[in-house]
Amino acid sequence: MKKCFLNMMALVILSCVPQVLAVEPGIVINEDNSHFYTTRSADEMSLEGLNAFVDQYADTKVSHLFLSPNSMRASFKSSTREAIWELGDQEMPEGAGAKWMSNARLLHERGLDPYAVWIARSREKGISPWLTMRMNDIHDVPNTKSYMHSTFWLQHPEFWRVPNDTSGGWTVRALDYGHEAVREHNMAFVKELLERYDPDGLELDWMRFGWHFKAGEEAAGVKILNEFMQEVRALTEAWGKKRGHPIKLGVRVPAHPDAARGLGMDAVAWAKAGLVDMIVPCPFWTSSDFDIPVELWREQLGDAAHDLILAPGLEFNTRAYPGGPAVANDLPSTRGFAASAWYRGADQIYLFNYMDSETIPVSQSDYRILVEQGLALDVVTRAPRRHIQAFRDTVPSGFPNGAVLPATGPEASFTINIGPRPEKGVVTFHIGLGNGEGVDSATYTAIVNGTPCGASSDRENPGTFPGAVRALSFTCPPDAVRDGANSVVVTQPEGQQIVWAEFRVDPL
């Protein structure tokens, strides 16, 4: 029997009896731990300013606000770790960092707890408020004097994934959950959040950042995090009884279930044990992942899939291959991600780094379109959408990351999921070519699902494809295009390389 999932935009859910929702699930927006403070003035550090942040999402398709109160430090006056403005021996930042510290401190001095205000205001406006805790944030760890670092992290380099690392690498300086003291430090903050606040749910963000054990010790880490999750679940259930309503538990984990397990985050086991109500399979940040295997998650979850929300997550930017140049997602690529995710079995769409200013990938005008129109299947399939060949950025050692670009051989093969094929419309396949001798006159052919595409035509503005000096478009025969995965084989002259590939769907 499917459990209830609190969705304040779907008030038809009145019990835990399976029902058909009257509306499509809304969008989940993740608000990070610094964005509000760095994008508002001191005058907006007020009850009116806090409420205005939530009010922009009222009466839109945003059904959930996930509010992050921490990195290593807290953005409020915490009893279990330093607040962001409690500088200590660290260096005073300039610019955005200084503004973050100042504005967060101003709210505290004015007697305002932003997370308590936002939780209350969200409920008032029909939006479900969650807290999302970053479990291993390591922003700026090469600089040990950064204002963001906690005393715990600084005083215990022996707890880093590579103890006492001197290389300055960021993933090796993540905290190792194999140490009991690390688990206790973070569990104390979990307890504080649940005691201090009254959210609809608590998300443990294991993707900030995605490495929690020494290399080679991830298998042992599975048992450790299983026990950690059991303890958190017991806490959310106990506090739910005290609050008089369920407090759900969610997790953000790597996009592929086997990759998640291989890094110690066995979300499938958590679900089967009844420990989680929501799983967000997602990339870290390096690139968006347009090939999240939602159907594989469902297969591995089995009956447990009926008892939770599976919400694949989209990131700010996209790279075609590891180390390649990045480009911010736009509204068509966001819609393309959603179309494929719905087709593959998603329950909801989760947007990370899609905040209301500066850190949004789309324009301000498109942001309003996004939140007001939403990403329901009937919305995204009626609008132009893009389906991009990218890669998986968080995987264990030896696990395939799905990268097929850059492609330099005589043939390049791509398999890209486009979700539902359009009943009417045009489907085109696009490639971006890297710099090379003769690239301006090189000729290419493309075959989609065994059927030749129309002759290539040059696209204007190839620079919109990162790293490309020339871009080509092929028209796909309508009868050759399939729902779901579509395979394309491109022939390429010697000495050339393909650095970008995508489908575009333009419904009529």
Image (cartoon, grey):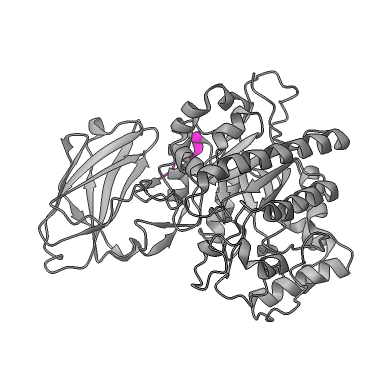
Left-right relation of 40 to 141? right
- Quadrant location of the N terminus? top right
Placement of 279 over or under 192, stated as above or below: above
Q: Is residue 298 magenta?
A: no
| Residue 442 horizontal/vertical position (percent) | 12, 60
Identify whether 383 is placed above or below 346: below
Residue 85: x and y in percent read 76, 72
Q: Position of residue 426 (x, y in %)?
A: 30, 40
Q: Is residue 378 magenta?
A: yes
Q: Which residue is rendered at x = 66% and y = 39% of the image?
A: 227
Quadrant housing residue 435: bottom left
Q: Which residues are magenta?
A: 377-384
Query: Can you see residue 461?
Result: no
x, y (%) of residue 90?
69, 78
The residue depicted at 27 percent of the width and 51 percent of the height is: 430
Of residue 288 and residue 445, the one placed in the foreground of this image is 288
